[in-house]
Image (cartoon, rainbow, N blue to C red):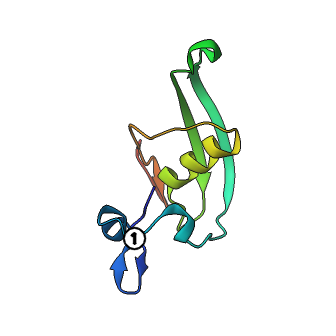
Amino acid sequence: AFSALRRNGTRAYELARKGELADADMEYREVHVYALEVTSCECAPDDGGKYAELEAEVGGGTYIRTLIVDLARAVSSAAHMTMLERVKQGPFRLDD
């Protein structure tokens, strides 16, 4: 999962698409995850699993796509994100 962060003036995802950047080349950044909850899960361990829905409260600069990939790697698995809905940004909430 490559972000829009710049590396030597070029966005990381652009370098990755050209084959000029690998996961191992990215520097880790400290982020703040204040809450992380599995809100729905249809898991079938025998066939590799299906999907999980997560709700996260994170600090600024956190890339959710990268967080999902990191979580999957931590349990020797793989994952990708199919949907992202931001429900709060600063003082603003989606339901307001």
User: Label 1, on which residue?
Assistant: 12
Q: Nearer the viewer, residue 34 or 90?
A: 34
Vertical relation: 34 (above or below) 25: above
Residue 43 position within the rendered picture, expressed as x and y whole percent measured from the top left: 59, 18
Residue 12 is left or right of residue 90, and the answer is: left
Query: Looking at the picture, which amino acid does disc 1 mark?
Result: Ala
- Please say if 41 is above or below 10: above
In the image, what residue occupies the spot 57% across and 52% down?
67
- Quarter occupied by residue 92: bottom left
Q: Position of residue 28 (x, y in %)?
A: 62, 69
Q: Position of residue 36 (x, y in %)?
A: 66, 43
Q: Residue at x 48, y 51 (%)?
A: 65
Q: Quadrant of residue 83?
A: top left
Q: How many marks?
A: 1
Q: Residue furthest front?
A: 19
The quadrant holding residue 73 is top right
In this picture, is 46 found above or below 89?
above
Q: Nearer the viewer, residue 16 or 70?
A: 16
- Label 1 crowd (10 A; few <14 / some 14-19 / many >=20): many
Q: Residue at x 70, y 38 (%)?
A: 75
Q: Position of residue 56 (x, y in %)?
A: 59, 46
Q: Secondary structure at mark 1?
A: helix
**Residue drawn at (41%, 43%), measured in percent from left and top?**
84
Left or right, 14 with reference to 30:
left
Q: Measured along the vertical axis of the image, is residue 39 above or below residue 78?
A: above
Q: Is residue 38 left or right of residue 6?
A: right
